[in-house]
Amino acid sequence: MGSSGFDLLSAGLRMMVLGMGMVYFFLIVMILAMKFMSRCLRPFADALQSGAKPAAGKTAAGSSDDAQLAAVAAAVVAHKLGK
């Protein structure tokens, strides 16, 4: 391997280290930004969770929605089977 091969290998290694360093730097900045945003938005999330109403039980409207969904699913299956 001549001196030009060593120079080429050295340049490749420097590019690799620089590129990987930039990726790690970006990932660290992104994690810090996400933690910062989480802390800033935490009061809003707490307000949304405390203001949320518990889910109600199934009603007559819920059962008709289930029947409608079943009918649509049956129609799709029948169409795919060519009936």
Image (tube, grey):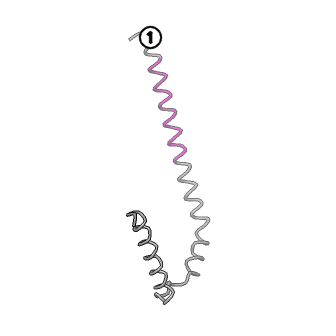
Instruction: Check the image and report above or below for 5 versus 22.
Output: above
Q: Is residue 31 left or right of residue 77?
A: right
Secondary structure found at label 1:
helix
**Quadrant housing the C terminus:** bottom left
In this rendering, the answer to whether 79 lies above or below 14 is below
Instruction: Residue 67: say if magenta.
Output: no
| Residue at position x 41%, y 72% in the image | 74
Q: Which quadrant is the N terminus positioned in? A: top left
Q: Is residue 61 left or right of residue 2?
A: right
Question: Which residue is at the front of the view, 74 or 31?
Answer: 74
Q: Which residue is mark 1?
A: 3
Residue 17 on the magenta segment: yes
Q: Residue furthest bottom?
A: 60
Q: Is residue 20 above or below residue 83?
A: above
Residue 35 or 59: which is nearer the viewer? 59
Image coordinates of residue 58 in percent, x first then y, are 46, 87
Is most of the magenta stretch helix, strand or loop? helix
Residue occupying the point 62% across, 65% down: 40
Category of crowding for the residue at label 1, using alpha-carbon neighbours closer than 10 angstroms: few (below 14), some (14–19), many (at least 20): few
Position in image of residue 35 (x %, y %): 55, 59
Residue located at (51% from left, 87% from top): 61
Decide: is 53 above or below 80.
below
Segment colored magenta: 8-27
